Structures are given as structure tokens and as C-alpha cells.
Image (spheres, rainbow, N blue to C red):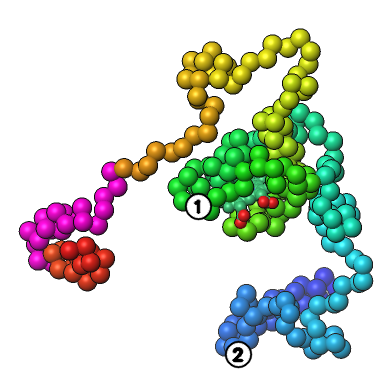
């Protein structure tokens, strides 16, 4: 019996070796280029329906995509925006909202939310001023929805901000609005009340520091005619570079 098994091992080895030699010759290719797999949406003869995938069982939900808390994910109840948070607002939530707001919203809306961020100051469509009565009067979930879907010229931030972060920012927008519309009744009794101008002076700034600011007009930006002297100087350059600007219509027009 041991004789037999050695013998059969020898025969198998021989067969495998022969196959390895013959395979490239016969052109049989079972490599990465030609794999037994289904490509999404491609038809297949495997199932009677001709599909390569099975239809989803009705009501099945992919793991992590249940989204059962409709208000948390959509900001809507009965197709209406609501003035409510889907979770309690704590100081941590507000701080997180402030941090995300300062990253994603301030370029257009500015740190105080007046809609005069750097990008707007330099020519972007005016962004909403969160202090404007019309925006202040909107229910809280409106802000969540603006971030989720975008609004007019404003792009959406659904990819950059999780629903949780969008809600935290919405809460922070309310805090910004409160901060600039506080009344004397909001101040605990006995608190020393100062104006912003007074606070600014104490901090070493001018009293008008908290006023609306503007960015100075851009100066020293060369105009087309300013380029003329550069172009004239270019004529003294070697012929190869000298010819290049002639095809550029904007430079021609400047002459
Ligand atoms: C690229 C510039 C830009 C950025 C960044 C931006 N916004 Fe806006 N936002 C706008 C513009 C522009 C409008 C006005 C849109 C319009 O009226 O067409 C606007 C309007 C709004 C409004 C008012 C909507 C209304 O009902 O009138 C809210 C609220 C708002 N943005 C929230 C945010 C929040 C929160 C962020 C940060 C996650 C943000 N925006 C980031 C440009 C921007």
C-alpha cells in the first residue's frame, strides 16, 4: 500500500506539471483580466430574470442607513420646517457648532454672520445676513435644510458636515442672533452693563472697532494699459519670445 500511494503521488505531480506546460499553449486564460464575476447592472443568464443582482426584499435597509429619526435627517415634520432641535443643546454642542461654522460658513457669512465674509467682500453674491429680520424669523430647521440642500447661490454642505454638525451650526446661528439682539432683560440683575464701544476701548481698540467694517478698495492692481510699458520692453527681447504676445487678443486690445 505505501508503494501505491508513492506511485499515485508521482503520477499526480506529472499530470500537474504537464498541465502547467500545456495551459499557455492551449490559450486557456483564467487570469485577472477574465474573472468569473458580475459587473453591476450587466445582464446575466444565471437567474431566470436575466439580472445579475437579486432585487432588494421590500422594506430592507442597508446597515447604517436606517435614518428612522426623520426630523434629525430631514429637518421636516409633516413636510414643514420646525423651530426645534432634535437633541438638547449643551455648551459642547454650541462650541462644536461655532468651530464648524468658523471653518465652513465664515468665508461668506463672516464670523458674526452678517453675510460680509471675505469672499463676498471680493465679489461673491451677497450671503445671507443672519441678523436680518427675515432670516431671524425662520424656524431653526430652515438653517439645517439650507446646509443640507444649498440655497440659491449657496452650495450645500451635506458632504462636509454630518447631520449632527449641521444641527450644531444651526444652534450656533441662533446663539449669534441672540448675541446681537440681547435686551436688558437678558442680563442677570446686578450685572455691570457696558456698551461695545466701551469694551473696545478697554481692550485697546478704537471705540468704532465693533462697527460695520468694509474692506478698502483694491489699489495697485495693474490695468491693461499699465501693461503697455512691459510689452514695449518685451519688444527688445529675442525674436522667439517677442512674437508670442501678438496672438493674444487681450494684449492687442490694450494697445
Ligand atoms: C460660498 C459662500 C457661502 C458659504 C461658504 C456659505 N454660504 Fe450661506 N449663503 C450664501 C449666499 C450667497 C446666500 C444667499 C443665497 C441667495 O439668496 O441666493 C446664503 C444664504 C444663507 C442662508 C439664508 C437662507 C435664507 O433663507 O435666506 C443661511 C441660513 C445660510 N446661508 C447658512 C449658511 C451656513 C450655516 C453655512 C456654513 C455651513 C453657509 N451658509 C456657508 C453663501 C455662502
Q: Callout 1: 10 Å neighbours few (<14), some, many (20+)?
A: few
Residue at position x 11%, y 55% in the image: 233
**159 or 224, which lies in front?**
224
Mark 1 Cβ inside 8 Å of ligand 1 = yes
**239 or 56, which lies in front?**
239
Report the quarter where the N terminus lies.
bottom right
Task: State which quadrant residue 179 falls in.
Answer: top right
Mark earlier in primary sequence (2, 1): 2
Q: Secondary structure at mark 1?
A: loop
Total labels drawn: 2
Rendering coords of residue 13 (x, y %) = 69, 76
Q: Is residue 211 above or below residue 194?
A: below
Residue on which the image places disc 1: 124
Q: CA distance from mark 2 to mark 1?
A: 66 Å
Q: Secondary structure at mark 2?
A: helix
Residue at position x 84%, y 43% in the image: 84
Rendering coords of residue 34 (x, y %) = 64, 80
Q: Callout 2: 10 Å neighbours few (<14), some, many (20+)?
A: few
Direction from residue 59 to residue 19 in the image, left or right: left
Q: Which range is magenta?
A: 220-240
Note whether residue 237 is visible. Answer: no
As drawn, the label of residue 240 is: none
Amino acid at each position: 500500500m505505501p508503494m501505491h500511494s508513492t506511485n499515485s503521488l508521482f503520477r499526480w505531480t506529472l499530470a500537474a506539471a504537464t498541465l502547467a506546460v500545456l495551459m499557455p499553449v492551449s490559450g486557456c486564460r483564467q487570469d485577472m483580466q477574465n474573472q468569473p464575476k458580475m459587473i453591476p447592472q450587466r445582464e446575466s443568464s444565471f437567474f431566470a430574470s436575466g439580472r445579475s443582482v437579486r432585487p432588494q426584499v421590500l422594506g430592507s435597509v442597508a446597515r447604517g442607513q436606517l435614518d428612522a429619526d426623520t426630523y434629525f435627517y430631514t429637518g421636516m415634520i409633516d413636510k414643514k420646517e420646525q423651530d426645534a432641535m432634535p437633541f438638547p443643546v449643551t455648551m459642547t454642542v454650541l462650541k462644536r457648532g461655532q468651530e464648524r461654522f468658523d471653518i465652513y460658513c465664515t468665508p461668506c457669512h463672516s464670523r458674526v454672520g452678517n453675510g460680509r465674509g471675505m469672499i463676498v467682500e471680493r465679489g461673491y453674491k451677497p450671503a445671507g445676513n443672519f441678523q436680518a429680520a427675515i432670516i431671524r424669523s425662520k424656524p431653526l430647521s430652515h438653517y439645517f435644510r439650507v446646509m443640507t440642500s444649498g440655497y440659491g447661490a449657496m452650495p450645500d454642505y451635506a458632504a462636509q458636515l454630518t447631520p449632527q454638525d449641521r444641527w450644531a451650526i444651526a444652534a450656533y446661528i441662533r446663539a449669534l442672533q441672540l448675541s446681537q439682539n440681547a435686551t436688558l432683560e437678558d442680563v442677570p440683575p446686578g450685572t455691570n452693563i457696558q456698551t461695545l464701544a466701551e469694551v473696545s476701548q478697554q481692550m485697546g481698540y478704537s471705540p468704532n472697532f465693533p462697527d460695520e467694517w468694509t474692506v478698502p478698495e483694491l489699489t495697485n492692481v495693474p490695468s491693461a494699459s499699465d501693461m503697455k510699458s512691459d510689452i514695449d520692453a518685451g519688444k527688445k527681447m529675442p525674436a522667439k519670445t517677442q512674437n508670442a504676445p501678438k496672438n493674444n487678443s487681450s494684449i492687442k486690445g490694450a494697445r
